């Protein structure tokens, strides 16, 4: 995998980013790498993109996937950046890096992001250098990003594995969104639902579809996709 149009990020920026991740990350998946003959070990990791409409339960699936004993070996989750405000309980460096709009714009200009997109009036972006460093080091990376971002990643890294998570129905999605964002601005809910309809229409552009009707099943399916890609020898 070779990212097109790589830009450089300063060492001090990288240090600051890693310092926060280290402080908050519990490493659950370092020890269970299966034995492979060295000459058959892939030199680079895989890049997975996991998208689906807001409220579909992406975090509910990723929580168990990244838990001890279940997380596939060497899978890392990328923490992305956003200009939206933290929701109650969200933590800097765990859920997102929360940036001001000015800081976000500055980073776009510096080429900091592998992809970036605007979603419901806020900006979101993936730190390019972090993804490149992890994949080059042989780790698999999972990005939880929206459909616009996923398609940008595909154009930059055609080997990326795109997984779409869908709700069993739009009605069920609306019910989940209302449950999660109770008390949120009704305009925001309507915007998210309208975006969800557009995103569902693009699911066919992905490599895999996981329907989140039952969390355990969705976790099993996503895990199987990650493990199959890791076992692949011809890339
Ligand atoms: P939320 O505000 O609900 O956390 O996220 C809104 C949407 O933005 C979700 O679909 C989420 O997956 C997506 N998202 C989060 N980080 C990124 C990112 O770095 N890039 C893009 N393109 N989308 C992102």
Image (tube, helix red, strand yellow):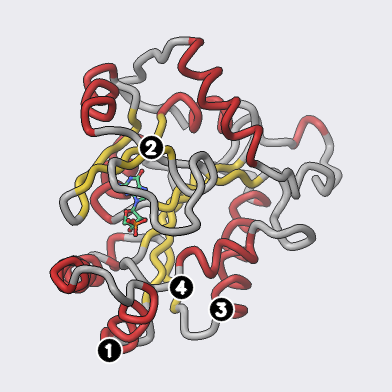
Res 176 → quadrant: bottom left
Mark 1 vs mark 2, CA separation in Å: 30 Å
Q: Residue at x 50, y 63 (%)?
A: 59
Using the image as rendered, state which of residue 182 and residue 28 is in the foreground: 182
Looking at marks 2 and 3 on the same chain, the residue that comes earlier in the sequence is marked by: 2
Instruction: State the mark number for residue 126.
Output: 2
Looking at marks 4 and 3 on the same chain, the residue that comes earlier in the sequence is marked by: 4
Res 55 → quadrant: bottom left
Instruction: State the mark number for residue 210.
Output: 4
Query: Is 110 left or right of 1, judged from the image as shown?
Result: left
The x, y position of residue 87, in whole percent, is 39, 57
Instruction: State the mark number for residue 215.
Output: 3
Q: Residue at x 37, y 51 (%)?
A: 145
Q: Is mark 4 within 8 Å of ligand 1?
A: no
Q: Is mark 2 within 8 Å of ligand 1?
A: yes
Q: Residue at x 41, y 31 (%)?
A: 127
Report helix, strand or loop for mark 2.
Answer: strand
Mark 4 vs mark 1, CA separation in Å: 18 Å
Mark 4 vs mark 3, CA separation in Å: 10 Å
Residues under numbered marks 2 and 4 in contact, where contact means CB atoms less than 8 Å apart: no
Q: Residue at x 60, y 32 (%)?
A: 44
Looking at marks 3 and 1 on the same chain, the residue that comes earlier in the sequence is marked by: 1
Q: Which residue matches tag 1?
A: 171
The x, y position of residue 109, in whole percent, is 22, 19
């Amino acid at each position: 995998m070779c990212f097109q149009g790589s830009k450089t990020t300063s060492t001090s920026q990288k240090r600051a980013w890693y310092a926060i991740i280290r402080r908050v990350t519990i490493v659950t998946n370092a020890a269970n790498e299966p034995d492979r003959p060295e000459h058959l070990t892939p030199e680079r990791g895989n890049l997975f993109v996991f998208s689906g409409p807001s409220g579909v339960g992406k975090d509910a699936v990723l929580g168990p996937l990244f838990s001890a004993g279940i997380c596939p070996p060497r899978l890392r989750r990328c923490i992305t950046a956003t200009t939206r405000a933290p929701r109650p309980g969200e933590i800097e460096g765990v859920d997102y890096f929360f940036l001001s709009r000015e800081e976000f714009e500055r980073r776009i200009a510096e080429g900091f992001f592998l992809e970036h997109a605007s979603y419901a009036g806020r900006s979101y972006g993936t730190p390019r250098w972090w993804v490149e460093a992890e994949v080059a080091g042989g780790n698999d990376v999972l990005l939880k990003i929206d459909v616009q971002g996923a398609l940008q990643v595909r154009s930059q890294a055609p080997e990326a594995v795109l997984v779409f998570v869908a709700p069993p129905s739009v009605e069920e999605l609306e019910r989940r969104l209302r449950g999660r964002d109770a008390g949120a601005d009704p305009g925001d809910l309507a915007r998210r639902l309208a975006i969800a309809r557009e995103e569902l229409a693009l699911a066919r552009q992905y490599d895999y579809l996981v329907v989140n009707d039952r969390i355990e099943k969705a976790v099993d399916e996503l895990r199987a996709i990650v493990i199959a890609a890791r076992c692949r020898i011809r890339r």
